[in-house]
Amino acid sequence: QQPVQSPQAVILREGEDAVINCSSSKALYSVHWYRQKHGEAPVFLMILLKGGEQKGHEKISASFNEKKQQSSLYLTASQLSYSGTYFCVSAMGNQFYFGTGTSLTVIP
Amino acid sequence: DGGITQSPKYLFRKEGQNVTLSCEQNLNHDAMYWYRQDPGQGLRLIYYSQIVNDFQKGDIAEGYSVSREKKESFPLTVTSAQKNPTAFYLCASSRQKPGQGIDGYTFGSGTRLTVV
């Protein structure tokens, strides 16, 4: 039931763009995205709901394909502060399930 | 400011001891959760509670226990039955149950537990 993310890791230069994908084997009601820096708690970035309602971050966007049970997170013009591990979280039934994680490193 | 407070930040446990991790929130959230994170891995759900005096097991509940006597508090006890307790423990809360709303989790800053 754990969502699978791709890629597992990515290295970007400042200013480059990245896409992180999240796939679930089960139907999704909503998908959350979080960023976690080393040794810290995850920080909420964005939520996407079935039906299109979205609440999120001003510099990061995301999409949610309900039929394909997939979500993608788009980071444009990356900054050094974007480095961290990104997790998607799917809501199914009464539980949230964290994805496998994507490590993103932005270098100068 | 509202938030979640976890304590202690670092905890050392001798083998065979029970230890309790504290989690308090003043966000008036109904749902609270405990997750465990091992190095380089994602978060795994230990227990969750959607209402006072009620809680459910997550994927890795064995060796752990919780209580939810107050809305604000959701302490986690790591018992001696947990054979590999060294990990980073995160408490979280949300206003709504999964699948019911547009709010995500708010996390505490975590407790790093080490068995010595």
Image (cartoon, coloured by chain):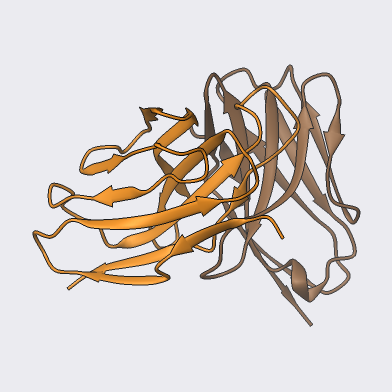
Residue B107 location in percent, x, y?
58, 53
Quarter of the image for residue B61 reads top left
User: Residue B86 at x, y = what percent?
Assistant: 27, 62
Q: Residue at x 74, y 20 (%)?
A: A66
A19 or B48, which lies in front? Answer: B48
Instruction: Give the chain letter for brown.
Output: A
* Image coords of residue B104 (percent x, y): 68, 40
Residue drawn at 55 percent across, 23 percent down: A25
Name the quarter where the N terminus of chain B is drawn: bottom right
Residue A62 placement, left or right of B106: right
Q: Is residue B36 left or right of residue B84?
A: right
User: Residue at point 66% right, 35% down?
Assistant: B95
Farthest bottom residue?
A108
Residue B42, given in percent of the width and then of the height, sits at 48, 50
In this view of the protein, which residue sits in the foreground, A29 or A65? A29
Residue at figure coordinates x 78%, y 33% from the top left: A48
